């Protein structure tokens, strides 16, 4: 069998990543590639602070190259990609964050910084700048009795060009920009659990906005049910899960909902599954559960290719994407 010529990153992985978590990484990446080559589609889910970790540097190219067909993410990942787009040079990195005292943390707050591990997001240049611009869209919708999903407001904001003067990174490294250019479907369950979600709620408290201006998670699930039904023909839709929590838990349940609650028994199971996680299986941890458990819930079949890479997603996800892109 002839060895496939690969780029330097994936070539290095092919040569050296032969055992344990390293081998699981290559196995999962190879199966991702094979799933796409057979004509399958892929969902990528984003938990944690992957946008602040600048996952857009690789994920945006995956989107542009047609290697991702739908994304599910937390509200934080949705907004933090745009925060980085407009305020990157104002971020502050703190490599010694483990040494910070409570007083040090308070000083950061008073200086207008919100810390995410070793990276501080600037309040004024990132959060408030986006608030001012997206609030205009929310108010327009409120006045016109219009309703949209959370990500649709972000798409409108990016496509309007209102933020262009503030760009501080190359927009090709923004995964949300790449998604907007393709009108990629995005699912954002629990969007209200985010900075801009809280800001939206504050404007509802004052009476400036109606809560109905932003559509709900139930409407995201009905949207996903329709999309899944239309796109799940063989070899089906793969599920590439980065981290745990609602970003993974919410969308994977669309299959048992369709099969068990709507009795659409011809609905295919997910056609591929991979999770990058550092959670362990203990005391009912769903994020650490092995994929086999999902078979009992009607999400995966015994034949679904399934992988777990127990590692740091900020290291592993770009490597999997590099393999799929042939880098």
Image (cartoon, helix red, strand yellow):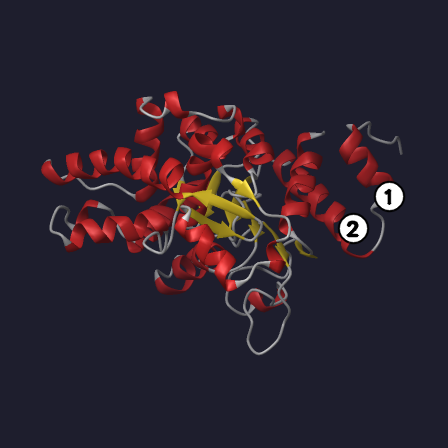
Q: Which of marks 2 and 1 is nearer the N terminus?
A: 1
Q: Judge from the rendering whether residue 166 lies leftward or rightward of residue 323; answer left or right.
A: left
Q: Nearer the viewer, residue 224 or 39?
A: 224
Q: Are marks 2 and 1 in contact (CB under 8 Å)?
A: yes
Residue 61, image quadrant? top right
The location of residue 232, given as percent across then percent down, is: 48, 44
Distance CA(mark 2)–CA(mark 1): 8 Å
The location of residue 238, given as percent across then percent down, is: 56, 46
Identify residue for label 2.
22
Where is the N terminus found, in terms of image quarters? top right
Q: Judge from the rendering whether residue 274 lies leftward or rightward of residue 125; answer left or right.
A: right
Q: Nearer the viewer, residue 282 or 230?
A: 282
- Disc 2 is placed on an element classified as helix
Mark 1 Cα shell of 10 Å, populated few (<14), some (14-19), many (≥20): few
- The numbered dot on residue 208 is none
Q: Which residue is drawn at 55% across and 76% down?
A: 284
Identify residue for label 1.
16
Q: Can residue 130 be seen in this view?
A: yes
Q: Which residue is drawn at 43% across and 58% down?
A: 250
């Amino acid at each position: 069998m002839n060895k496939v010529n690969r780029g330097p990153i994936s070539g290095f992985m092919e040569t050296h990543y032969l055992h344990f978590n390293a081998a699981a990484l290559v196995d999962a990446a190879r199966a991702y590639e094979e799933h796409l080559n057979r004509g399958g589609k892929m969902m990528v889910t984003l938990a944690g602070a992957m946008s602040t970790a600048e996952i857009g540097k690789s994920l945006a190219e995956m989107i542009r190259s047609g290697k991702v067909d739908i994304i599910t993410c937390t509200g934080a990942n949705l907004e933090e990609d745009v925060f980085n787009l407009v305020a990157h040079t104002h971020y502050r990195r703190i490599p010694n964050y483990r040494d910070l005292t409570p007083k040090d943390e308070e000083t950061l707050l008073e200086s207008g910084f919100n810390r995410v591990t070793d990276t501080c997001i600037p309040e004024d240049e990132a959060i408030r700048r986006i608030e001012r611009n997206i609030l205009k869209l929310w108010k327009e919708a409120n006045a016109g009795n219009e309703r949209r999903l959370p990500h649709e407001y972000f798409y409108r904001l990016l496509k309007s060009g209102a933020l262009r003067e503030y760009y501080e990174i190359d927009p090709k490294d923004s995964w949300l920009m790449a998604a907007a250019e393709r009108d990629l479907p995005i699912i954002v369950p629990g969007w209200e659990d985010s900075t801009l979600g809280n800001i939206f709620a504050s404007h509802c408290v004052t009476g400036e906005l109606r809560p109905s201006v932003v559509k709900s998670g139930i409407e995201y699930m009905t949207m996903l049910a329709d999309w899944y039904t239309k796109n799940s023909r063989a070899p089906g839709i793969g599920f590439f899960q980065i981290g745990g929590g609602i970003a993974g838990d919410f969308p994977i349940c669309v299959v048992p909902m369709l099969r068990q609650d709507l009795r659409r028994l011809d609905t295919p199971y997910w056609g591929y599954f991979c999770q990058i996680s550092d959670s362990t299986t203990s005391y009912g941890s769903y994020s650490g559960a092995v994929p086999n458990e999902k078979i009992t819930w009607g999400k995966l079949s015994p034949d679904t290719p399934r992988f777990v890479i127990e590692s740091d997603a900020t290291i592993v996800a770009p490597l999997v994407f590099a393999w799929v892109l042939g880098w």
